């Protein structure tokens, strides 16, 4: 004779108001929230908070936006499962029971992946090597944010759980990456604005160069309108931005590269990393960074006839297996190139030609004048206003040039194209980059600058 055990589907759709259910062998009794009494409620719903603890959930809908079903626990061992398609709980029971259902926060990478519906929607692009941009994509199965700043809502508050995210804790998502191809993604964050001296520190010996002193609005106190207009390339909010060398002034070790650079070992991975408390440090992956890039022609092109583009740069950067493991790094050249609207992914990073318009002075470290792009073979100057990663100042990248005398690293220039500088004598601004651990959870937010995504503390 078949067992009298019955299967009950608790098909409570989103938007229906139920607090508790007492499960019987013959029927399901539902009680609305406004009439439920504590001892008569058979179902409790618990959700994970930012601190990782479970707390009572008292809203009228299943907590499914940033949550996933964790487990169901019943006093009399009834079995509970979650149907992610119908958004319903399935109960298997042959007796009355009281149950608690737990929903945990999603890994942030999984949530970002769930936002993708088609290339360009919400500024997300899936780099699978097929579709409209097939030959231009990285083809690494990554999901990257691309396009103008106004359409990309990818802000994250990291390092603070304050109700209002401090500006210094505001980051943005470059994308999510599965670099070891195991199906597990990691979120890659970049600081939303340049790092200042309070975060990076200042070492004896002069790794800090001069400062960019920023002028706003119609301030022409320097009596040079052209110079003041040049400052307006800067997209951030700082009034003074320090510039850093990789090494100390006068360092004669011309073979020192990223693994031994003071910018890496001291300013980023001692001073900057040390500003995070232990709970936040646990969420930062100790990552393998590819820093040996390629030659001038392989990475920036350097001429109007060059075929160098985002895809070829990415392939070159990732092909060299020389890596350095650490928590904090900088952007790759390909990160910056893929931050642009895909209409520009076919542009050469730098076409090697420009018209120089003199003017201004360099008392605060700004290069003089402006640089006009080549209209016949435009480079990334043309993409500057369609690339959310463009911030307007000369900025270090982690990718090194392999065919120069002494150590040179590539950089984003104020006009927006990619160039390179000798790391021992030149000083540029810094935007720290980090990878979250794959289990880093999303705990709220909308991804805007005023309501950024929040990260749960494990």
Image (cartoon, rainbow, N blue to C red):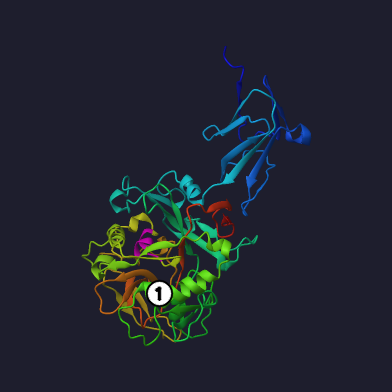
Nearest the eye: 455 or 276: 276
Mark 1 highlights which residue? 394
Query: In the image, is residue 159 part of the stretch drawn in magenta?
Result: no
Q: Mark 1: which secondary structure?
A: loop
Pick out the residue farthest to the front: 1
Res. 35 visible in picture? no
- How far from the left and from the top, in percent, is residue 421? 33, 77
Tell me: residue 366, above or below residue 106. below
- How far from the left and from the top, in percent, is residue 356? 32, 78
- How far from the left and from the top, in percent, is residue 222? 49, 85
Tell me: residue 120, above or below residue 209. above
Pick out the residue farthest to the left: 305
Packing grade of label 1 (10 A; few <14, some 14-19, many >=20) is many
What range is drawn magenta here? 331-338
Q: Main secondary structure of the magenta part?
A: helix
Quarter of the view holding residue 41: top right
- How far from the left and from the top, in percent, is residue 377? 26, 64
- Tell how many labels: 1
Res. 132 visible in picture? yes
Quarter of the view holding residue 325: bottom left
Q: Is residue 366 left or right of residue 400?
A: right
């Amino acid at each position: 004779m078949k067992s009298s055990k019955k299967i009950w589907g608790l098909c409570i759709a989103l938007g229906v108001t139920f607090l508790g259910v007492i499960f019987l062998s013959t029927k399901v009794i539902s009680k609305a929230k406004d009439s439920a009494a504590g001892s008569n409620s058979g179902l409790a719903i618990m959700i994970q908070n930012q601190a990782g603890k479970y707390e009572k959930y008292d809203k009228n809908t299943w907590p499914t936006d940033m949550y996933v079903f964790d487990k169901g626990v019943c006093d009399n061992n009834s079995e509970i499962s979650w149907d992610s398609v119908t958004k319903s709980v399935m109960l298997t029971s042959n007796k009355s029971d009281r149950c608690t259902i737990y929903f945990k926060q999603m890994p942030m990478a999984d949530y970002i992946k769930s936002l993708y519906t088609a290339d360009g929607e919400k500024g997300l692009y899936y780099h699978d090597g097929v579709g409209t941009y097939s030959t231009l994509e990285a083809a690494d199965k990554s999901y990257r944010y691309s396009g103008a700043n106004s359409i990309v809502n990818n802000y994250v508050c990291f390092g603070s759980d304050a109700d209002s995210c401090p500006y210094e804790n505001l980051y943005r998502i470059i994308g999510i990456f599965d670099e070891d191809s195991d199906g597990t993604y990691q979120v890659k964050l970049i600081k939303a604005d340049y790092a200042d001296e309070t975060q990076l520190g200042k070492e004896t010996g002069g790794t800090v160069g001069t400062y960019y002193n920023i002028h706003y609005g119609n301030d022409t106190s320097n009596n040079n309108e052209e110079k003041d207009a040049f400052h307006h390339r800067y997209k951030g909010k700082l009034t003074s931005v320090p510039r850093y060398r990789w090494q100390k002034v006068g360092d004669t070790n011309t073979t020192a590269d990223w693994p031994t650079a003071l910018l890496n070992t001291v300013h980023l991975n001692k001073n900057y990393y040390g500003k995070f408390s232990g709970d936040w440090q646990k969420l930062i992956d100790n990552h393998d960074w590819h820093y040996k890039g390629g030659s001038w022609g392989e990475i920036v092109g350097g001429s109007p006839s060059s075929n160098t583009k985002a895809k070829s740069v990415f392939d070159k950067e990732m092909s060299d297996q020389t890596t350095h493991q650490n928590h904090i790094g900088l952007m790759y050249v390909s990160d910056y190139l893929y931050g642009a609207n895909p209409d520009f992914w076919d542009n050469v990073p730098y076409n090697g030609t420009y018209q120089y318009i003199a003017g201004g002075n360099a008392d605060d470290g700004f290069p003089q004048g402006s640089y006009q792009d080549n209209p016949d073979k435009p480079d990334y100057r043309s993409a500057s206003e369609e690339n959310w990663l463009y911030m307007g100042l000369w900025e270090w990248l982690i990718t090194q040039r392999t065919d120069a005398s002494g150590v040179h690293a590539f950089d984003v220039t104020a006009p927006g194209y990619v160039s390179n500088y000798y790391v021992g004598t030149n000083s540029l601004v810094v935007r720290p980059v980090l990878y979250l651990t794959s289990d880093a959870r999303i705990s709220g937010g909308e991804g805007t600058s005023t309501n950024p995504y929040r990260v749960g503390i494990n």
